[in-house]
Image (spheres, helix red, strand yellow):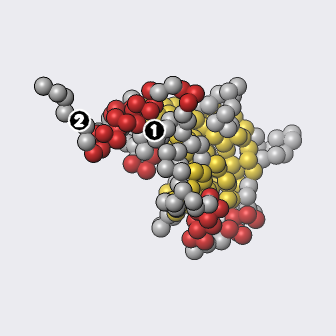
């Protein structure tokens, strides 16, 4: 008796698993490039873009995320996701289409005027930094006039789903803002109860950066940028997400 051959989704999952187990240096997933677009003038919105070329398909993509900083929620009608299903299409064409659609949400010109401060940065290629802890001066004032801003990220094993089960443990995360002043308390700013489908099959996370903005007359805001390492077609892919919040004046 011969074993039945896997078909449909099972065949695709098996093929991807075999690719992940193949010789490490021969294949690699794609790492999206991050572009911080900026904040609205009042700090109520944070926006960023990720873009690149999909591994396996070769299709260019560009995704734009617009986040209500106080509620840590996407604005209505977003994210904007563009993937040009043509290997001959250019990455610039994908980015241009996403940019044009984004103008109806908030103009790039306003975001560019309010870029804020890149207070901390940790690229996916960085080997010497702690990928799960970041402590920064919130703005480039020396000597500092603000309390340090510190975050730690804890990876959390999540219940397996059928589509992700062949690839190992599905991971969520908890993000803590650490107390750095006397009398302050460490707080949980995000904790996964489940992993949304939009993250694919996440294998892990790392702190990618901290962007801050001090609007005129308003409360300062921050965005913690987090790299998601997820199952890709030819190897682990890296995508981006952000967790936002406000700081005391």
Which one is nearer the viewer's eye here, 187 or 26? 26
Residue placed furthest toward the right: 142
Position in image of residue 8 (x %, y %): 27, 45
Instruction: Classify 10 Å Cα crowding around label 2: few (below 14), some (14-19), many (20 and above).
Output: few
Position in image of residue 132 (x %, y %): 59, 31
Position in image of residue 198 (x %, y %): 43, 50
Residue placed furthest toward the front: 1
Q: Residue 231 carries which label?
A: 1
Whether residue 27 appears in this view of the structure is: yes
Q: Name the residue under label 2.
A: 5
Q: Which circle, 1 or 2, is nearer the viewer?
A: 2
Left or right: 216 in relation to 160: right
Quadrant of the rendered structure where residue 66 is? bottom right
Name the element at disc 1: loop
* 76 relative to 136, above or below: below
Identify which residue is drawn at 40% across, 37% down: 16
Whether residue 230 appears in this view of the structure is: no
Which one is nearer the viewer's eye here, 103 or 46? 103
Left or right: 1 in relation to 168: left
Identify which residue is drawn at 47% across, 67% down: 77
* 114 relative to 129, above or below: below
Q: Residue 147 carries which label?
A: none
Q: In which quarter of the image is the N terminus?
A: top left
Identify which residue is drawn at 61% across, 37% down: 207
Identify which residue is drawn at 67% across, 53% down: 35
Residue placed furthest toward the bottom: 104
Position in image of residue 145 (x %, y %): 81, 44
Left or right: 99 in relation to 229: right
Quadrant of the rendered structure where residue 177 is? top right
């Amino acid at each position: 008796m011969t074993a039945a051959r896997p078909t449909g989704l099972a065949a695709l999952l098996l093929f991807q698993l075999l690719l992940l187990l193949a010789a490490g240096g021969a294949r690699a997933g794609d790492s999206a490039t991050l572009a911080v677009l900026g904040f609205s003038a009042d700090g109520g919105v944070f926006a960023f873009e990720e873009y690149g070329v999909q591994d396996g398909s070769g299709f260019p993509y560009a995704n734009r995320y617009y986040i209500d900083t106080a509620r840590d929620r996407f604005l209505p009608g977003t994210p904007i996701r563009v993937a040009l299903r043509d290997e001959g299409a250019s990455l610039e064409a994908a980015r241009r289409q996403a940019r044009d659609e984004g103008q109806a949400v908030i103009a790039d010109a306003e975001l560019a005027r309010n870029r804020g401060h890149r207070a901390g940065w940790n690229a996916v290629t960085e080997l010497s930094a702690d990928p799960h802890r970041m402590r920064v001066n919130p703005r480039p004032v020396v000597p500092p006039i603000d309390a340090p801003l510190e975050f730690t990220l804890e990876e959390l094993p999540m219940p397996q789903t059928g589509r992700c089960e062949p690839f190992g443990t599905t991971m969520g995360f908890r993000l803590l803002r650490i107390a750095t002043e006397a009398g302050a308390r460490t707080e949980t700013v995000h904790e996964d109860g489940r992993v949304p489908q939009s993250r694919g099959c996440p294998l892990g996370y790392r702190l990618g950066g901290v962007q801050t903005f001090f609007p005129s007359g308003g409360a300062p805001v921050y965005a913690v940028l987090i790299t998601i390492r997820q199952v890709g077609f030819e190897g682990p892919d890296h995508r981006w997400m952000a967790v936002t919040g406000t700081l005391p004046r």
